[in-house]
Amino acid sequence: MIGTRFIILLYCVLRYFRGSMENTALVVLFMLLYISAVTSAYLFRRSSLKTLFRILAAGVLAASSVFASELFLLLMSAEIYELVSGFTYDWKALPVFAAIPAFFNTDSGVILEYILISLLSLVVFLLAKRHFDVVGSLQRANDELRDRIDHLSVRLNAGSEYETQLRYLSQIEERNSLAQKIHDEVGHTLAGSIIQLEAVGLIMEKDTARAGEMVRSVTENLKNGMESIRSTLRAIKPAPEQLGINRLRLILEEFELNNKLETDLSYEGRLDVITHMQWSILADNMREALTNSLKHSSATVIKVKIEVMSKLVKMEVRDNGKGEAAVKKGMGLSGMEERAGAAGGKLIIDGSDGFSVITLLPVETDDDRRAAMVQSGGSNADKSVDS
């Protein structure tokens, strides 16, 4: 509407210069008063002040069209539209009020121009009002969404705190249960064994048979206590395969969260035959393969599959990226190959369909484990002899 007023005012100035140019000082005065009133109406935020200055602007136009130049009448419709729209939402009432000045200037030579400019101003005003209403509704929707997001964030934070407290409480309860179990079973066993050993010390010289019987009883009680400790530790200690596969799952979830890529993990076979060292190699190779796919393949999905066969452990990391026929081994791939080779395994790289990295590791048998333990024991014995 400011632009519409500016165009109409420019038109009035051109018409004035092409005419008789009478009352120039008065015209300039009324023009400055009008511009000041319109500018003030847009500067103030309070609706009452806006309405006051729009009424003042309309009054200046009415006075200037009578005392200075009838061309000021052409600006009246824009003021009427904005003034009336503050009191009614029916746009059909706007042209009715805009037609009022035409009835009071029946002898004026600008009536036809006033009608045309009024229609043009009405179209601009309705378009501007519609745009303003759309922007206002979008702002309100945005504010509602922001409030909803804040509310959900508060609930999410509360849920996270509740989950943290629940996890902490579960740990405390588990520790308390473990402590109570050790106290009830192991503690009583040790306390009874100590009392019996003290009694053995008192009767050893007098009643050797009785002392021997008590020593055997203490020995049996301590064996039972040791077995109770072992069963308790086995109950709370997770299996190695659970630690290994959960570690891989955690790496994939963190990678998917940070890089917005879809990942998938599947496995087949006996995971318990995979050693701790092999799990470490698989995790390092998988992490390196994920980094390579992110940097070079432009993939959207990365799948990791672990298969435990009779003699081999196979892990394949495959993406759906562009692949590469001639693969150049950099430091990452060379490091993966060295890790697999150091454990007696092999690395297979395929870039024909996406990009695939396969890590093959040998399954360690019981004989291999015993040989490793014997070798480790021999090394320790050698070290003790040397020392």
Image (tube, rainbow, N blue to C red):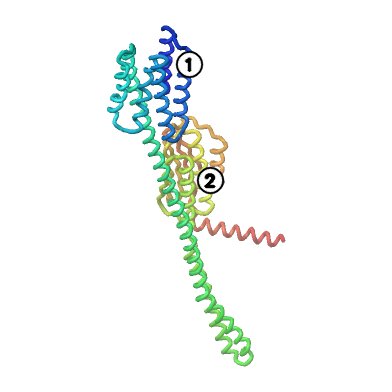
Please determine whether, in this image, residue 379 is positioned above or below residue 316: below
Quadrant occupied by the C terminus: bottom right
Viewer can see residue 310: no
User: Residue extending furthest right?
Assistant: 387
Task: Identify the amino acid type marked 1.
Answer: Val
The residue lying furthest to the bottom in this view is 206
Q: Which-is-in-front pick, marks 2 and 1?
A: 1
Residue placed at 56% from the left, 85% from the top?
Answer: 214
Mark 2 Cα shell of 10 Å, populated few (<14), some (14-19), many (≥20): some
Along the line of sight, which residue is nearer the eye, 334 or 108? 108
Left or right, 351 with reference to 130: right
On screen, 193 above or below 297?
A: below
Label 1 near label 2: C-beta < 8 Å?
no
For image coordinates 44% across by 46% down, the residue present is 150
Q: Which residue is mark 1?
A: 28
Between residue 102 and residue 319, name the one nearer to us. Answer: 102
Whether residue 33 is visible to the viewer of this picture, yes or no, is yes
Foreground of the two, 140 or 266: 140
In the rendering, at what x and y percent does residue 280 appear? 53, 50
Q: Residue at x 28, y 28 (%)?
A: 93
Residue 348, percent from left and from top: 48, 39
Which of the numbered marks, if any, corresponds to residue 284? 2
Tell me which label, 2 or 1, sits earlier in the chain.
1
**Element carrying mark 2:** helix
Q: In terms of secondary structure, where does tag 1 sit?
A: helix
